[in-house]
Image: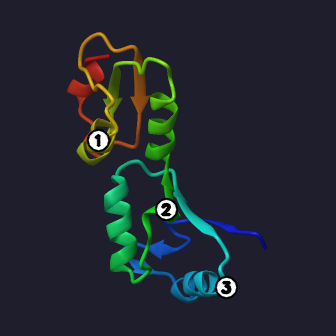
């Protein structure tokens, strides 16, 4: 194998715990020098939150070993010659990742709408659209 892409929820972790064999698998990959990357489409947590969650489960994650749906969206937006003004429907931690990347989050006059898995969703957020 040249490398592995690993899901997090329900594949590597179940809740806050590593699934049986997951830690041994990850450490075996590192020992063998086999590249891998954790992926997640769950945008309810920030990149730092995911790293902390993996660390708490004993995975010793390195930042380069994780790529989130938030990261992919940020990369797409920041690759634009003029990054658009964004209305984000997402959690405060996702918003912090966007802001740290220099993306302008606005309530009025957005040029782009980004919908994430928002555990803080309210009617007020939807009404603004």
| Residue annotated with mark 1 | 100
| Relative to 88, 62 lies left or right | right
Mark 3 or mark 2: whose residue is earlier in sequence: 3
* Picture residue at 45% right of the left edge, 74% below the top: 14
* Picture residue at 44% right of the left edge, 80% below the top: 59
| Residue annotated with mark 2 | 64
Q: Is residue 113 above or below residue 37?
A: above
Q: Secondary structure at mark 3?
A: helix
Q: Looking at the image, which is closer to me, 78 or 4?
A: 78
- Seen as rendered, the residue at the extreme top is 109
Instruction: Give how far apart the Cα atoms at labels 3 and 2 are.
Output: 17 Å
Is the N terminus in the top left, top right, bottom left or bottom right quadrant?
bottom right
Which color mode does the image show? rainbow
* Picture residue at 52% right of the left edge, 69% below the top: 10
| Residue annotated with mark 3 | 32
Mark 2 or mark 1: whose residue is earlier in sequence: 2
Q: Position of residue 72 (x, y in %)?
A: 51, 42
Is the C terminus in the top left, top right, bottom left or bottom right quadrant?
top left
* Picture residue at 67% right of the left edge, 76% below the top: 34
Q: Is residue 60 above or below residue 86?
A: below
| Relative to 123, 68 lies left or right | right
Q: Is residue 10 above or below residue 58?
A: above
- Seen as rendered, the residue at the extreme left is 124
Instruction: Give how far apart the Cα atoms at labels 1 and 3 are.
Output: 34 Å
Q: Secondary structure at mark 2?
A: helix
Q: Position of residue 64 (x, y in %)?
A: 49, 62
Q: Looking at the image, which is closer to me, 112 or 74?
A: 74
Estimate how packed mark 1 is, as few (under 14), some (14 to 19) or many (20 or more) residues with alpha carbons within 10 Å: few
Estimate how packed mark 3 is, as few (under 14), some (14 to 19) or many (20 or more) residues with alpha carbons within 10 Å: few
Q: Position of residue 94 (x, y in %)?
A: 32, 44
Q: Looking at the image, which is closer to me, 35 or 108?
A: 35
Estimate how packed mark 2 is, as few (under 14), some (14 to 19) or many (20 or more) residues with alpha carbons within 10 Å: few
């Amino acid at each position: 194998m040249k490398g592995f892409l690993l899901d997090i929820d329900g594949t590597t972790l179940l809740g806050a715990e590593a699934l049986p064999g997951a830690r041994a698998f990850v450490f075996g990959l590192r020992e063998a020098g086999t590249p891998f990357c954790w992926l997640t489409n769950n945008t309810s947590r920030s990149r730092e939150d995911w790293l902390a969650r993996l660390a708490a489960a004993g995975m010793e994650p390195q930042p380069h070993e994780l790529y989130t749906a938030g990261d992919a969206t940020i990369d797409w937006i920041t690759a634009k010659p003029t990054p658009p003004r964004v209305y984000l429907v997402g959690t405060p931690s996702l918003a912090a990742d966007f802001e740290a990347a220099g993306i302008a989050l606005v309530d009025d006059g957005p040029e782009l709408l980004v919908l994430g898995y928002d555990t803080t969703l309210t009617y007020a957020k939807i009404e603004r659209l």
